[in-house]
Amino acid sequence: MKKQLLFTVLAGSFATLIFSSHAVGPYNGGAGNHTGSLGSPANCSTGSGCHATNNTNTTASLLLVSPTNDTVKDGQYLPNTNYKVVVVGANPTANLVKFGFQASCVDNATSTTQKGTFTSSNSQVSVINGGAIKLVEQNTPISAVTTPAGNAYGTTFNWTSPATGGGAVKFYLTLNAVNGNTTSSGDQPNAATPLTFTEKPTSVSNIKLESSDLYPNPTRAELILKIKDWTAGNYQVIIYGLDGKVMLQQTASLSAGAVQINVAQLAPGAYFISLNDGGKKLVGSFIKN
């Protein structure tokens, strides 16, 4: 099932990229949380001696990309799903050739409880323990891509959504376009606006895989799922431990009525497996030797 969510967030000013200490990231540089969550300022023009006045020249967007490499667009997340979060932004000012950012994801109702799990997907981004919640921010000024319209900004990190029943969440994003002159002069941060989106209902029709459709079982490395009446393409496969914890999640290709999955990395034991088509879900169990 392919979901797509594109949301535009007014990017915001955050800790000083300009001072060398803040170039490693707002929180890590001593400026704290400036995303707007947990009672923090939603910009860097106030508090912690951070930055100058917000500037609307700087814009930003945040995209959620599903495990099947589709951008989600319906304002809903699937539980227990590992999304790629793509931060993109722009500024027409020629000399603002670098940028930094800070992001958080919290409970929609309170803005104080962490929702989901962040992991870094590249060497320029760090996950920071901000106390009650986690933050994602740059650990070095990130270079822009120069275009005829000005500077374009982009980076990524990963977000694993909450388990079923996690409820509505609120993403906060701030972004600062900088010139890298080691002072705040000329930098153009912008005020952040939160984005709320809801949990996607997962009440789909479950179809139990027969033992003959899931083999070899037990298996040491490769597991084959025979699937009838499904269209060839890419589908999300999730493998759970007996305690319900997600142990393996990947995109698998259905071809000639079968999906092949490598489970060699799993420890020996019993597991559940599901393959989701949106309107229906195949479920089964297997033993890893």
Image (cartoon, rainbow, N blue to C red):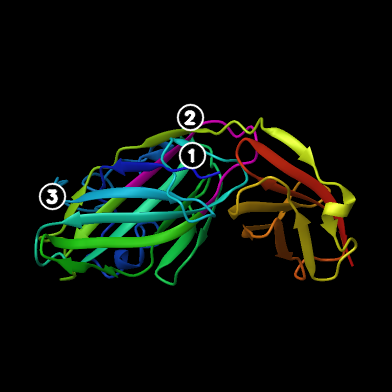
Instruction: Look at label 3 and name its amino acid.
Output: Asn
Inter-mark Cα distance, 1 to 3 = 27 Å
In the image, which is nearer the foreground, mark 1 or mark 3?
3
| Magenta part of the chain | 159-173
Rendered location of residue 92, percent (x, y): 11, 57
Q: Return the residue at label 1.
A: 106
On screen, residue 103 above or below 96 = above
Q: Quadrant of residue 22?
A: bottom left
Rendered location of residue 9, percent (x, y): 30, 42
Considering the numbered disc 3 on the image, is that residue within a helix, a strand or a loop? loop
Q: Return the residue at label 3.
A: 57
The answer to whether the residues at label 2 and label 1 have Cβ atoms under 8 Å apart is yes
Is residue 34 among what the camera can see?
A: no
Inter-mark Cα distance, 3 to 2 = 30 Å
Q: Residue at x 49, y 39 (%)?
A: 106
Quadrant holding the C terminus: bottom right
Q: Return the residue at label 2.
A: 110
The answer to whether the residues at label 3 and label 2 have Cβ atoms under 8 Å apart is no
Rendered location of residue 221, percent (x, y): 80, 71
Is residue 260 among what the camera can see?
A: yes
Dot 2: few (<14), some (14–19), or many (≥20) neighbours within 10 Å? Answer: few
Dot 3: few (<14), some (14–19), or many (≥20) neighbours within 10 Å? Answer: some
Dot 1: few (<14), some (14–19), or many (≥20) neighbours within 10 Å? Answer: many
